[in-house]
Image (cartoon, helix red, strand yellow):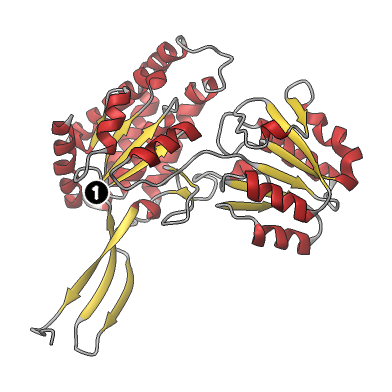
Amino acid sequence: MNELFVKTKRASKSLALLSDQQRNEILLAVADAIIDQQERILKANAEDLAKMDKSNPLYDRLQLTASRLEGIAGDMRNVATLPTPLGHITKQKTLPNGLRLCRVSVPFGVIGMIYEARPNVTFDVFSLCFKSGNACVLKGGKDADNSNREEVALIHEVLERFGVSKDVVALLPATHEATGEMLNAVGYIDLCIPRGGRKLIDFVRDTARVPVIETGAGVVHTYFDKEGDLEMGKAIINNAKTRRVSVCNALDTLLVHKDREADIPQLLAPMQGKVTFYYNDESLYDTEFMDYKMNVVTVSSLEEALAHIDQHGSGHSEAIITQNEQTARTFQAHVDAACVYWNAPTSFTDGAQFGLGAEIGISTQKLGPRGPMALEEICTYKWLIEGEGQIRA
């Protein structure tokens, strides 16, 4: 596997020779290929789906459809239309000694991506990495291995057609050992990003010898305040919970002010028969359900809601429903999360929805990127210094 890392690192240097126009042409060609050759992708995906129980919450994440491939291709086309994140001068000055300093955005180099039953991530990561001049090493889960391999094969075919080394995108075996190899690939992997459940993210953080950005795991809350609008609340809560239950921005715990306890049946009415509700179940306070399940907890005040989120939130996405602006601003100022909503569902936490084209993950940490990570977030910078013979005393 070391040979693969060496090839990818070497190939990453060649990306600097491509113009942004060339990168965009290749991205558009891959997007076209996704649609033109969707049957081969869907066939591989069907092989993966056949091995998974439909009742498994991950089944929805694993499943690709013609409409989902249309969306993936659309996101890739959007990425191609975005301004390049490279070569941006973010700071510039001249020192008293005449040295001219310029800080400019550049790629990380090689980004390692570890993800589970999410074959859409293969295309999303490729598009963002390629646009930003990064090579990528992908490590998907065994549940999606057939899908991932067919997708990477398609990408390789397009790259070779344009005369670009296919080594700029590598897919590791879907084994635990391959994960360990990636996490120890010092000198070859410049940044590793895990995207999956808490167990995966904790393992990567605790094991890696390469730099890591944590993403993904979301224990998500919505607080329905005593001054919340009932009809608005019904729509927001239903969308946050049921739009896609298996994604990390889906609602897990609904907090309801005790003065509005009588409205709980109406708030939950749109989800009746679809969602299993638990009430004030302390054993589920830290649960990310990824399923049609939700805990409903009553609180006596805004302060109690904030304390609950402080203790049990994962720093991903949190929301408040209220008509009181002061209450909303207090909530947004206090809650320590990447995305904090007022009168809108947490389902909007998504790179494409934020106008970023796509996302490589949702960062829940504070060092470096936070929230949806797209082109700018997978670039770093370097200093360029120009002199005229100055020497340091």
Q: Nearer the viewer, residue 62 or 55?
A: 55
The residue at 36%/44% (across/down) is 128
Q: Which quarter of the figure has residue 112?
A: top left
Q: Which quarter of the figure has residue 203?
A: top left
What SS does tag 1 mark?
loop
96 sits left or right of 204 in the view: left
| Above or below, comparing residue 264 to residue 133 in the picture | above
Quarter that holds the N terminus:
top left
The residue at 27%/23% (across/down) is 173
The residue at 46%/9% (across/down) is 50
- Res. 16 visible in picture: yes
- Res. 163 visible in picture: no
The residue at which mark 1 appears reads as 109
* Residue 302 position in % (x across, y down): 78, 54
Looking at the image, the residue that sits furthest to the top is: 50
Q: Nearer the viewer, residue 235 or 227?
A: 227
* Residue 255 position in % (x across, y down): 76, 43
Looking at the image, the residue that sits furthest to the bottom is: 96
Q: Residues within 10 Å of mark 1 (few under 14, many from 20)?
A: many
* Residue 350 position in % (x across, y down): 53, 44
* Residue 52 position in % (x across, y down): 49, 13
Quarter that holds the C terminus:
bottom left
Looking at the image, the residue that sits furthest to the left is: 389
Q: Count up the numbered dots.
A: 1
The residue at 19%/33% (across/down) is 166
Q: Nearer the viewer, residue 366 or 23?
A: 366
236 sits left or right of 96 in the view: right
Q: Amino acid at mark 1?
A: Gly
328 sits left or right of 226 in the view: left
